[in-house]
Amino acid sequence: MDAAALKTMQAPIKARYRDAPDDAVVTLRARGTLDDASIACKVETGRALAVAGLHPATGGSGAELCSGDMLLEALVACAGVTLKAVATALAVPLKGATVTAEGDLDFRGTLGVDKEAPVGFRSIRLAFDVETDAPQDQLDTLLKLTERYCVVFQSLNVKPALDVALRRT
């Protein structure tokens, strides 16, 4: 897809959202059920069932997916799609690109070993290795706009309102 095709595809969507801003608000959902036999959660992905369990650093076998890895994978997926869309819109020629995310966790926090240790990532690094002949100013703009429009990056960067509930069924 080139810039013209992307703009043609998105033009009516953008126009609708300008005219009816409420149409742009979409609620995404994820659902999972607890495994009966092990400490795991079966997450419905829309394509397959992903089984998440304890990370080996917390006693897991490593056979199930780690939710921390899944968070980083979601960041890579979103950032990669955003980078490609922005590059396409700006006609920045990319011959290839690799997106990498890594994050540092201190498992003492999640295991309750040290109440001062944070629960969750203490830092996350996102990197793009691009194969391109584009000038540096275009690459600077590409990175700036990718960061600005990546939903997962921005959700991590600017904490959304969070709510949690426990309901009896």
Image (tube, rainbow, N blue to C red):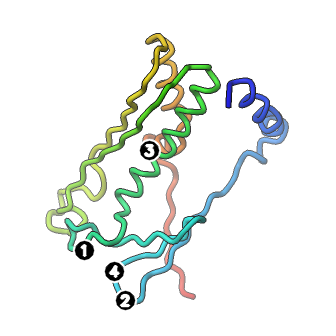
The amino acid beneath tag 1 is Ser
Q: CA distance from mark 4 to mark 2?
A: 7 Å
Q: Residues within 10 Å of mark 2 (few under 14, many from 20)?
A: few
Lower sequence index among marks 4 and 3: 4
Q: Residue at x 49, y 67 (%)?
A: 164
- Describe the element under mark 2 as helix, strand or loop: loop
> Left or right: where does residue 125 sit relative to residue 135?
left
What is the distance, in whole Å, between disc 2 and disc 1 at their CAs?
Answer: 14 Å
Q: Which residue lies at the image location 41% right of the left edge and 38% below the top edge?
A: 99
Q: Secondary structure at mark 4?
A: loop
Q: Which residue is mark 1?
A: 61
Label 3 belongs to which residue? Answer: 76
Label 1: how many Cα within 10 Å (few below 14, some 14–19, many 20+): few
Give yes or no for contact between labels 4 and 3 (Cβ–Cβ under 8 Å): no
Percent from the top left, x then y, of residue 11? 79, 31
Residue under label 2: 37
